[in-house]
Image (cartoon, rainbow, N blue to C red):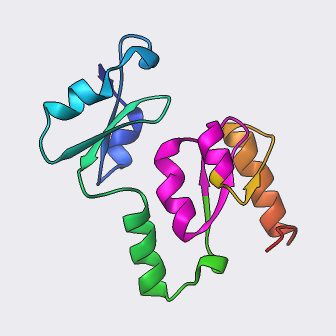
Amino acid sequence: MRPSWQNKCKKFDLAFYPNYDIKDIKINEIQNNLKGVKVLISGYAIHFLPYNADKSLGLGELMRRKKLMREEVIAVGDSDTDIPMFKIARGIALGNSTSKLKEEALLVVNEKSGRGIVKIASLILNNSLKN
């Protein structure tokens, strides 16, 4: 496995790209060998994080500190690892998102990855997001 380029920006979890098809990964086998560590597969990489943690913890803490309500916060995602954020904020799924994440989203844009981010920014700036 090789480390994700994003690890230098991360303070909470680490991601690695496998040297083989990610669909062949036996997540339970990896999880059973790591105590206190949660192992997730985003569809792109394998993520290792503290067992009792997920992406909603940081977002939730920010919302608490800034006294923000769910209706005031948008979470954007593309994989099942983003579902916890969608539970506490208004979730928008990118076009290349997993079907499970799309089911959890309040809105799904057709555009993928970076183009999807541009589309969402445009919707926000044009005040076109529906509550």
Which residue: 37% across, 66% down? 57
Q: Is residue 127 left or right of residue 40?
A: right
Across and down, in percent, residue 35 comes to: 12, 42
Which residue: 48% across, 28% down? 44
Which residue: 51% across, 51% down? 82
Across and down, in percent, residue 123 comes to: 83, 62
> Which quadrant would residue 91 be assigned to in this image?
bottom right
Q: Is residue 31 above or below residue 25?
A: below
Q: How many marks?
A: 0
Q: Is residue 93 left or right of residue 15?
A: right
Range shown magenta: 76-103
Quarter the N terminus occupies: top left
Q: Is residue 62 above or below residue 97?
A: below
Q: Foreground residue, 6 or 85?
A: 85
Quarter the C terminus occupies: bottom right
**86 in the magenta segment:** yes
Q: Is residue 73 left or right of residue 95?
A: left
Across and down, in percent, residue 25 comes to: 35, 19
